[in-house]
């Protein structure tokens, strides 16, 4: 199965939602549940283990809330560290945050004033799940997200990245600034183009591809590339 560029990844998501009729929240549920499976395997069983989820305000963070819910249901002690305010969440990410809050999960907003101490908080966990930023990131990270990534790396705890380590370029596999160094990356649908670069391995660790309910043949269809090109030109 071929590796996907940033735009090909977006095209497949659009096809699943607009043509197949799969709601985005269903894709997010599938992605988060399968990431939770991978984290559980990484821990050799989640029951009684302490798991920190570092989440951003976008869809990658939404996946993180799903991971938190499923690991909590399996007996893990889970805390979500939200980089930024709750009010920035929207769409499917906000839905899954609301579910997590209704279940009483431990969700902590980590604003600029508290980021400097994040590594100390994370150091007490068995694993950190990186769900801060996804494939849409281009160029060097700045501001709170950059600080959060530096704090995750400084915690000295193994990291499992959701879809792509935060800060790694999806297309080139280059780290142009602070970038999460993961022991494992659980990526959706197919490997990302940047993972083909040997230098990306120090950030991705082991790469595990999971199926989130999109037919595998969609990944190899030239029609997906053509559809993406047509929409970008319109």
Image (cartoon, rainbow, N blue to C red):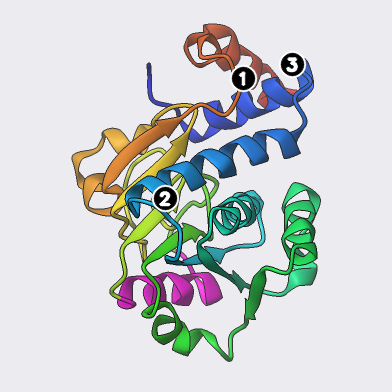
Q: Earlier in the sequence, mark 1 or mark 2?
A: 2
Residue 20: numbered disc: 3
Secondary element type, mark 1: helix
- Residue at label 2? 39
Q: From the viewer's side, name the closer residue of 174 and 195.
A: 195
Locate residue 163, reporting x and y percent: 47, 43
Q: CA distance from mark 1 to mark 3?
A: 19 Å
- Judged by its main secondary structure, the magenta piece is helix
Which segment did they paint magenta? 141-155
Q: Residues within 10 Å of mark 1 (few under 14, many from 20)?
A: some
For the point 76% across and 66% down, the residue is 101
Q: Earlier in the sequence, mark 1 or mark 3?
A: 3
Residue 122: numbered disc: none
Labels 1 & 3 near each other (Cβ < 8 A) = no
Q: Is residue 44 above or below residue 110?
A: above
152 magenta-colored: yes
Residue 229: numbered disc: 1
């Amino acid at each position: 199965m071929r590796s996907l560029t940033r735009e090909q990844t977006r095209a497949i998501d659009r096809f699943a939602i607009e043509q197949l009729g799969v709601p985005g929240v269903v894709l997010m549920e599938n992605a988060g549940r399968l990431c939770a499976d991978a984290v559980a395997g990484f821990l050799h069983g989640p029951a009684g283990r302490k798991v920190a989820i570092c989440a951003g305000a976008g869809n990658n963070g939404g996946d993180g809330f799903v991971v938190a819910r499923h690991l909590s249901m399996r007996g893990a002690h889970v805390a979500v560290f939200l980089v930024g305010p709750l009010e920035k969440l929207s769409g499917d990410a906000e839905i899954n945050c609301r579910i997590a809050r209704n279940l009483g999960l431990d969700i902590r907003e980590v604003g600029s004033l508290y980021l400097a101490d994040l590594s100390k908080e994370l150091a007490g966990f068995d694993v950190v799940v990186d769900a801060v930023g996804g494939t849409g990131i281009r160029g060097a990270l700045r501001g709170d997200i950059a600080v959060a990534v530096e704090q995750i790396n400084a915690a000295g705890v193994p990291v499992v990245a959701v879809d792509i380590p935060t800060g790694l370029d999806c297309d080139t596999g280059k780290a142009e600034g602070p970038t999460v160094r993961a022991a494992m990356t659980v990526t959706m649908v197919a490997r990302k183009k940047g993972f083909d670069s040997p230098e990306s391995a120090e950030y991705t660790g082991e790469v595990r591809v999971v199926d989130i309910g999109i037919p595998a043949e969609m990944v190899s269809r030239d029609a997906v590339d053509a559809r993406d090109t047509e929409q970008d030109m319109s």
